[in-house]
Image (cartoon, rainbow, N blue to C red):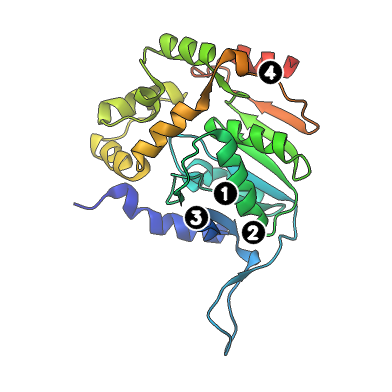
Amino acid sequence: MVNLVAAQKPLMNGLMKMAGVQPYSVEIEPGTVMNFWVPCETVKKPGKGEKKVTHLEKPTKPVVVLVHGFAAEGIVTWQFQVGALTKKYSVYVPDLLFFGGSITDKPDRSPTFQAEYLVQGLRKLGVEKCVVVGFSYGGMVAFKMAQMYPHMVEAMVVSGSILAMTDSISVESLNRLGFSSSAELLLPNSVKGLKALLSVAAYKKLWFPDRLHKDYLEVMFTNRKERAELLEGLVISNKDATIPSFPQRIHLLWGEEDQIFKQELAYNMKEY
């Protein structure tokens, strides 16, 4: 039986190319490949008589990097924003490692490790400066990027995310939502579990048939072992939590009814 979510991917690719971005794979180092959606105008195909090697040119417009959350890969998360941004910006949408076909054989699973490889990938694509937009898990990776590479990250937009997942925030959120672990919430293995995640993560309750939920699980929740390790690598001890000094402008964008990270956390971050 055809997977309906997978079957939509060619259509998505066509629509995104019309919007101004196309997929491109970057080998950051042997064993590590990160997939990106990059501006179409930066991808130059060989002319007649030239070797069949596509090369990239540097972006000519201000760069915006859109970093996805934990429940979906890059273009699924940002498909409705890309077209609105490409007229004025060079838009890059990465698939973080273990999402959307991006892989590594390295053992590290921390947000720092994701940020380091994302920056290396962007540099290989010719990006020198950018504004980073991070949603949920992607926001934590974006904060690490801004902290470690202030000369690259000029400004940030962070939506529904926090600086770091501490013991206390993790326990409080899971207890309040009625889940025993982050994996139970963010790595559902059944239609019921996916519905529970969507009921927490989405403000508007949209109905989809169980068949579509099942197909989404098969396509979007691959590399389950590695993603479970990413969740383990996300939580840090309260005593290890520090507040970096960020030179960038930071805009916090929050839903009033955010159930995972309450608005109070956003106000606390603003004060810090």
* Residue 93's disc number: 1
Numbered label tally: 4
Q: Earlier in the sequence, mark 2 or mark 1?
A: 1
Q: CA distance from mark 2 to mark 3?
A: 12 Å
Q: Which mark is residue 124?
A: 2
Q: Secondary structure at mark 1?
A: strand
Task: Tell me the residue that label 3 is attached to.
Answer: 33
- Please report the residue visible at 75 percent of the width from the left and 45 percent of the height from the top: 152
Q: What residue type is disc 4 on? A: Met
Task: Quote the CA–CA distance across marks 3 and 1.
Answer: 15 Å
> Picture coordinates of residue 234 (x, y %)?
51, 27
**Residues at circles 4 and 3 in contact by the CB criterion of under 8 Å:** no
Q: Is residue 50 above or below residue 180?
A: below
- 36 w.r.t. 98: above or below: below
Disc 2 crowd rating (10 Å Cα; few below 14, some 14-19, many 20+) is some
Residue farthest to the bottom? 49
Q: Could you say whether the residue bearing mark 2 is in a helix, strand or loop?
A: helix
Residue 222 at x, y = what percent? 35, 43
Q: Which residue is mark 4?
A: 269
